């Protein structure tokens, strides 16, 4: 489809990408949302926790919300989306990836950008449990890459999946990593690394024969983490093999569900390969919108409702 022209034009301070990113991740507060937790037992003996929010009236529509790296279902970009969707008559299922709900998961493996087998189990569970006839995917950052990969891998998708909206998606993981390792993103990268290493130390207690203190001590960058843990725990040769096989960019051409990607031009986490202009122009189901502003999962707008929350609902309504 033709590239979508964006109308996003935030107040002057939020034209700064870093301010937009930090406001969304740390400062924004979302109040009044009720979440009910359900534990989903996975086929390999592990679990994921799902946090449900329901519309006031019974509905046949549900949106599945997928968080980013080291996020969870209580992050403001997830709770904000859940609150907005439920007010519009759409139930929201906010997924906590393995190990992200406050409880260490049971297995040595955890979650990663390409773990679409977990998303597949979530979708199947929801459709078996509830009588929804319209399912929408709304993924953010890592969760956005996962949603795109899930849609484009060639599996037989449930007929109930009607549309997807992904925000700040690192469609090419190595391109995104290169940006995260630059000085401009040092604070973000160090924060991610610290959280990941903390979890890895907890893993070592449970699996002392699979990790050593020396290996953990050698983790100086996010790539080191992926070389030492992510690749080994999830069946990849190394970090580069993980990035290559898990990037959604290669799967965009086969997506056949209406899908909107919104990546801001001033998103400091995204490299050039994360802006799929060519892929969108070649696929009638793929829409790409790239506002000048928004930062990474930012997109501040008035009344504590982000531009991307309103845009996601608008895109869903366009598919009806």
Image: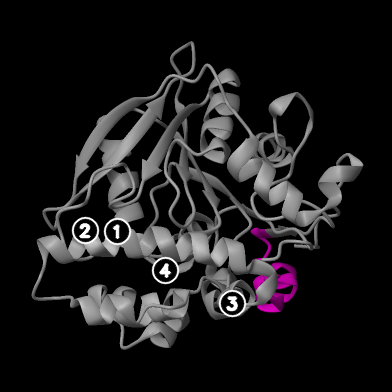
Label 3, on which residue? 181
User: Going by the image, does 21 lie left or right of 115?
Assistant: right
User: Going by the image, does 186 lie left or right of 263?
Assistant: left
Q: Is residue 216 magenta?
A: no
Q: Are marks 1 and 2 in contact (CB under 8 Å)?
A: yes
Identify the residue at image location x=75%, y=62%: 1
SS assignment at label 1: helix
Q: Which numbered disc flags the more N-terminal residue, 1 or 3? A: 3
| Position above or below: 203 against 232 | above
Identify the residue at image location x=47%, y=77%: 221
Q: Mark 1, mark 4: which one is toward the viewer?
A: 1
Label 1, on which residue? 199
Badge 2 local density, few (<14 within 10 Å), some, or many (20+)? few
Residue 274 found in image quarter: bottom right
List x then y, in percent, for residue 175.
Answer: 61, 79
Label 2, on which residue? 202
Label 4, on which residue? 154
Q: CA distance from mark 1 to mark 2?
A: 5 Å
Count how many numbered circles sit on residues in the image. Answer: 4
Q: Which numbered disc flags the more N-terminal residue, 1 or 4? A: 4
List x then y, in percent, for residue 38.
Answer: 26, 31
SS assignment at label 3: loop
Identify the residue at image location x=65%, y=34%: 313
Using the image as rendered, state which of residue 281 and residue 212 is in the foreground: 212
Q: Which residues are magenta?
A: 269-286
Q: Are marks 2 and 4 in contact (CB under 8 Å)?
A: no
Badge 4 local density, few (<14 within 10 Å), some, or many (20+)? few
């Amino acid at each position: 489809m033709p590239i979508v022209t964006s109308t996003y034009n935030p107040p002057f301070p939020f034209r700064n990408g870093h301010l937009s990113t930090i406001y969304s991740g740390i400062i924004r507060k979302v109040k009044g949302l009720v979440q009910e937790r359900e534990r989903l037992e996975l086929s390999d003996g592990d679990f994921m926790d799902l946090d449900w929010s329901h519309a006031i009236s019974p509905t046949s529509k549900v949106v599945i919300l997928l968080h980013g790296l080291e996020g969870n279902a209580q992050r403001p970009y997830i709770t904000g989306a859940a609150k907005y969707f439920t007010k519009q008559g759409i139930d929201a299922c906010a997924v906590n990836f393995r190990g992200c709900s406050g409880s260490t998961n049971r297995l040595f493996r955890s979650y990663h950008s390409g773990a679409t087998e977990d998303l597949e189990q979530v979708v199947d569970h929801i459709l078996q449990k509830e009588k929804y006839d319209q399912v929408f995917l709304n993924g953010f950052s890592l969760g956005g890459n996962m949603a795109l990969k899930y849609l484009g891998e060639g599996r037989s998708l449930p007929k109930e999946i009607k549309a997807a909206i992904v925000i700040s998606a690192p469609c090419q993981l190595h391109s995104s990593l290169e940006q995260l390792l630059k000085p401009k993103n040092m604070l973000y990268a160090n924060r991610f690394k610290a959280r990941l290493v903390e979890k890895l130390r907890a893993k070592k207690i449970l699996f002392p024969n699979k990790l050593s203190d020396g290996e953990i001590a050698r983790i100086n960058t996010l790539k080191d983490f992926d070389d030492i843990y992510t690749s080994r725990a999830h069946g990849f040769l190394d970090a580069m093999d993980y990035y290559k096989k898990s990037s959604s960019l290669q799967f965009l051409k086969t997506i056949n569900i209406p899908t909107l990607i919104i990546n801001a031009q001033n998103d400091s986490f995204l490299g050039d390969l994360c802006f799929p202009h060519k892929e969108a122009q070649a696929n009638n189901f793929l829409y790409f919108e790239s506002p000048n502003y928004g930062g990474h999962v930012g997109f501040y707008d008035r009344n504590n409702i982000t531009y991307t929350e309103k845009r996601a609902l608008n895109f869903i309504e366009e598919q009806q």
